[in-house]
Image (tube, rainbow, N blue to C red):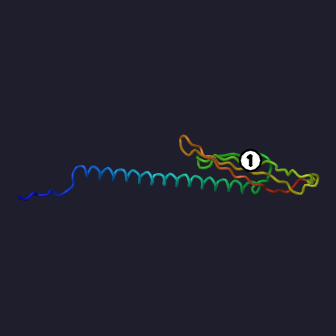
Amino acid sequence: MSVSKQQGFSLLEIVIAFSILALSLGILLKIFSGGVNTAMVSEDYTVAVQLAEGLMSRTGTESSLREGEESGVENDKYDWLVTVTPYFFDSANNDVSSKLAELFKVKVIVSWQANRFNTRQLQLTTIKLTKGSQ
């Protein structure tokens, strides 16, 4: 008497294989979607930095540097605010009667809506020098 041996996979082995495959694909899709999300956030920050640097370089070059605020919207997404305020040293030897130059603090804030629940913001600050009043 010979006993025939069955060849192939049992139903349990197939269910386990499909479960492992489904779990692996779920993890891979999560990794790739996280990468895409990171790339989109990075692109938004890159645009915001370029906008802020452009606004900062224009301040004091296209018009005279003076105290005040200016705001606007770029590409229907990025709200920006440029604030210019006088900058003073706290020095005992500072003689303000003979000012040959004035310092101004320039602050640029760019904000945008990342999604329905999250607003992102970028701020750059610098000191600019202009000819003083005599």
Residue 13 in view (yes/no):
yes
Counting other residues with Cα less than 10 Å from the Cα at mark 1, is it few (<14), some (14-19), or many (20 or more)? some
Amino acid bearing label 1: Thr
Of 1 and 56, nearer the camera is 1
Q: Residue at x 29, y 50 (%)?
A: 16
Q: Is mark 1 on a helix, strand or loop?
A: strand
Q: Which residue is drawn at 82% across and 54% down?
A: 103
The image shows residue 3, relative to residue 109, as above or below, that is below
On-image quarter of the N terminus: bottom left
Q: Which residue is disc 1 drawn over?
A: 83
Residue sticking out furthest to the top: 117
Question: Looking at the picture, how far across and down is residue 132, in whole percent?
Answer: 87, 55
Residue sticking out furthest to the left: 1
From the viewer's perspective, tell me whether residue 18 is left or right of residue 125.
left
Of 31 and 48, nearer the camera is 31
Of 59 and 6, nearer the camera is 6
Residue sticking out furthest to the front: 1
Question: Looking at the picture, how far across and down is residue 7, in whole percent?
Answer: 17, 58
Q: Which residue is drawn at 89% across and 57% down?
A: 100
Question: Looking at the picture, how far across and down is residue 96, in whole percent?
Answer: 92, 52
From the viewer's perspective, tell me whether residue 119 is left or right of residue 82.
left
Question: Looking at the picture, how far across and down is residue 31, in whole percent?
Answer: 45, 53
